[in-house]
Amino acid sequence: MHDTNIKRLADLKEFDVLRDAAEALCSHNDDGETLEVAVFCKISGHTDAARALLEHLVKKAPTYAAAHYELAVIYRDLKRLLEAVPHARRAYELATNSFRFGVFYAHMLFANGAWDEGRQQLSRVQAENDEETAELLAMGDFGDYLRDFPRNRALFITQELRSKYYWMNAREVAKDIEQAIIQKRPFSLIRLGDGDGAHFRVSEENEKSYPHLHKATRSAHTKFLLGVDVDPVFTGYTGLTSKLAEYVCEADILGIAYPSWIAHEYDIASPITLNCLMNINRFFYENDRVPNLSLCDQLIHIQLHDQKLLEPIVKRLPAVTVISCLDGLPGRIREMFGIEDVEFIKIPSETYAPHLYGETRLRQSAHYPHVFWPTIQRLSAPHEGRVFLIAAGTFGKYYASIIKRHGGIALDLGSLVDGWMRLVSRPGYEAFATE
């Protein structure tokens, strides 16, 4: 019965029909079953279906705490932060012993600028272990961060970088890449996302102002990348990432978070992503201008593709090296661009990439440290203007810097290669499947 209802809800497009279907489902299913379907719809990306179910469920069962909580989460995901508050509050009132409900209510208060109320709410929540204590402290820091760097200030900083640095559009970036290839000049284009920004240190003062938030986001992104069983200090990963900014500042062109991305993270009050992106933008805004570095949008790889600027460049290459976890990528590049000499440096696929589950994956060795350092050693050789196409996440930023240091041309294309392989790993990549 679940499958039939889920498919039916997922396929419906008209909200009125969806609402009627949700009402019927609520009438015929028990509350727990309805909540289960709603959560499934939410995690499957069918937000309207989930919202319709939950709105009817809280009317049918107004004392069902979990339904109020899930509806508050949906409103937050829909950028309707003010509407999330009463349901977050009701969930906590109905289950004051729930740590998760209590912290989320404080989160939504902070998201709406209620700093004092959020602090008061956090003081009511009881942590039962070190992990919960760390989460409470991190949420308190997040509230302070939102207060100190509200949405408009973040957007102001992001916009000001276009004046402080030379800001390049896609056509200019393509021209620089072409010139570097013609001249066989060492060159790198690097793009930075939230996983990279987690490890940026704006200043010592900033580290001391929000220590628990920085610790939480770095831990979350490290576990996301390496898994929960890797000790980042023992393996040296913490030491490596503390120098990430030094490496990426060697780039010729650096892609950073653009205004609409920053706005989105504020609109959903993301405690994991928001400050990470701003770590990057604030680093370049608050520190002295890095010489010989130009900036562009982080999605420059997609802009180059959409404006058909990258394909002519790649087609003229006599040879190329690809760093990726996708086994079929070298063949796809030969097919798309007519390049016979495609060297392939295979790296493990990461644990956070569910769209790659159908691929042959390197399971015998983790990327870091077992594959990372041998790859660094392999790249530490003269390249004489050879072009490298890189899709290696945070590790790819280090690879790009090493390649440039040794005379190569490094293009951090990231998830664009997923599009080439017709893997829908990012929103908007569906169009690749028809190309």
Image (tube, rainbow, N blue to C red):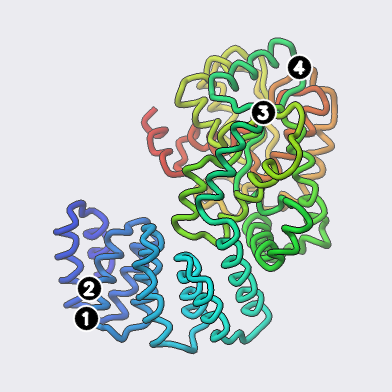
Q: Is residue 80 above or below residue 388?
A: below
Q: Quadrant of the C terminus?
A: top left
**Mark 4 in CB contact with mark 1 (< 8 angstroms):** no
Gap in angstroms between the C-alphas marked 2 and 4: 62 Å
Location of mark 3 (residue): 294
Asked if the residue at tag 3 contacts the one at tag 4, i.e. Cβ–Cβ closer than 8 Å, the answer is no
Task: Point out which mark residue 56 bears.
Answer: 2
The spot of residue 273 in percent (x, y) is 57, 55
Amino acid type assigned to the residue bearing label 1 in the image: Lys
Report the label total: 4
Which residue is drawn at the image coordinates 83% and 56% (left, top)? 236
The x, y position of residue 432, in whole percent, is 42, 33
Q: Is residue 21 left or right of residue 40?
A: left
Q: Identity of the amino acid at label 3? A: Ser
Residue that mark 1 sits on: 60
Choose the circle earlier in sequence order: 4 or 1.
Answer: 1
Can you give x and y, in whole percent of width and height, for residue 62 in the image? 27, 83
Q: Amino acid at mark 4?
A: Arg
Q: In front here: 140 or 356?
A: 140
Q: Disc 4 to disc 1, how far (Cα)? A: 67 Å
Q: Position of residue 268 (x, y in %)?
A: 45, 58
Q: Where residue 185 is drawn, which disc sits there? A: 4
Q: Are marks 1 and 2 in contact (CB under 8 Å)?
A: yes
